[in-house]
Amino acid sequence: MPVLSGPVAELAANVAVPFEQARAMPKSVYTSPEFLEAELSKVFAREWYCVGRASALKEPGDYIAFELARQPLMAIRGLDGEIRCQSNVCLHRMSTLLEGRGNRRIITCPYHGWSYEADGRLRSAPAMKGNDGFCRENYRLPQLRTEIWLGWLMVSLNPDAQPVSERFAAVEDMIRPFGMADYAEWFNESFVWNTNWKVLAENFMESYHLPVCHAGTIGGLSKLEEMICPPSPPHFNWHSILKDPAFRIACAHPSNTRMEGDLRRTTLLLALYPSLLITLTPGYFWYLSLRPKGVGQVHVTFGGGMSNDFLNDPDVPELFATLKGLLDKVNVEDKGCTERVYRGLCSGLAAPGHLSHPERPNYDFATYLFRMTGQP
């Protein structure tokens, strides 16, 4: 058993007590560069990360450039229709290749003009005939584990990562009546907030804050006493909320015969470790995919859309516009709350308090983080 020290040792003590006695995670887990390094190497470099919905890459050449555990990567749909995740670094002098998102059927390095096919094979390299050791066929951008699961585009730097369908088989069973694979993404955005990534993850995992933080938006749509927050499996946590039937877009469409009883107005909030956070209702979904950008910033991919059950309703554009406006206001509220929490965590006078029963998912998340960072 390794000897633990620093923030990992503090986290070990934090999760060593039963949930009924547990406190929020130690400050060092959020503010320590040492702990961030452990997260990057032992969590984000080993687990599955969600790039977004696969449907975002519709056409051959559509790409998204991103970073994972400090590795510049790209997800791109090839001319053969396959989506691949691969290195975003040129194999010549190691410049990054693509930025943001767009469409490139041929990927050309902005430094010396080496070009690649969308599947990563080197297409051409100017002025290389004088090098006897150069062979174009020997060059291909390193390929990564890539899977599409229920419409999500997942990537891992770990070649031995358990298949996504196995890792999250219990999630798939739980959400089968929703038919999430058929939900259509209507928007996708990216932004950076000034908080630690775990503060935002935990904010999603508990609805204890809804009546206060979201008093101006969704705080009155759910009741704390109706929330279900069970102990969680090893790879994810969840809790559920019953929505008011008057919130039509959050409830099952009349044509939906997959759901009965309270399930027709149940919202599931799923946190798939480490950082895919999904709010799933019978009518719509929205999600956050997080990755750390230093200890005090988090890069957020924010997307969402509708169940296809609603697509033929004549007023669905108005319904969704109203929903998107609501989600944008909720984001403003969450940004304020989570950035205030991070500023508070950096205070020398701050100390973590006891958790409330709706914060059970936060305790299970802390247990997961210790399980990952406490290993050799």
Image (tube, rainbow, N blue to C red):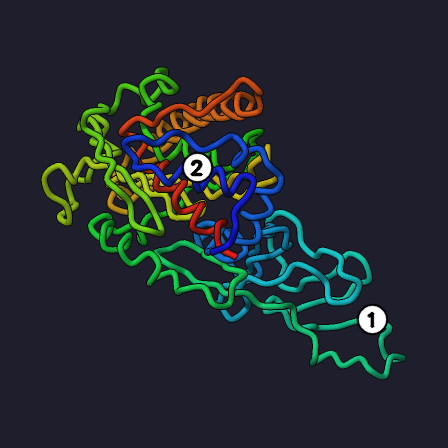
Residue 210: which numbered mark, if any?
A: none
Number of marks drawn: 2
Q: Left or right: where does residue 210 sit relative to residue 60? A: left
Residue 201: which numbered mark, if any?
A: 2
Where is residue 189? Give x, y as percent.
51, 39
Identified by mark 2, the residue type is: Ala
Q: Residue at x 75, y 72 (%)?
A: 124
Q: Earlier in the sequence, mark 1 or mark 2?
A: 1
Question: Does 282 appear above or below 87?
Answer: above
Compute the Cα span from label 1 to label 2. Answer: 46 Å
Identified by mark 1, the residue type is: Pro
Closer to the camera, 176 or 345?
Answer: 345
| Image quadrant in which you'd find residue 318 | top left
Q: Residue at x 54, y 47 (%)?
A: 39
Q: Which residue is mark 1?
A: 126
Tell me the crowding category of disc 2: few under 14, some 14 to 19, or many 20 or more residues within 10 angstroms, Cα based: many
Question: Does 48 appear above or below 244?
Answer: below
Q: Residue at x 53, y 34 (%)?
A: 30
Where is residue 140? Give x, y as percent.
66, 72
Question: Does 82 appear above or below 264?
Answer: below
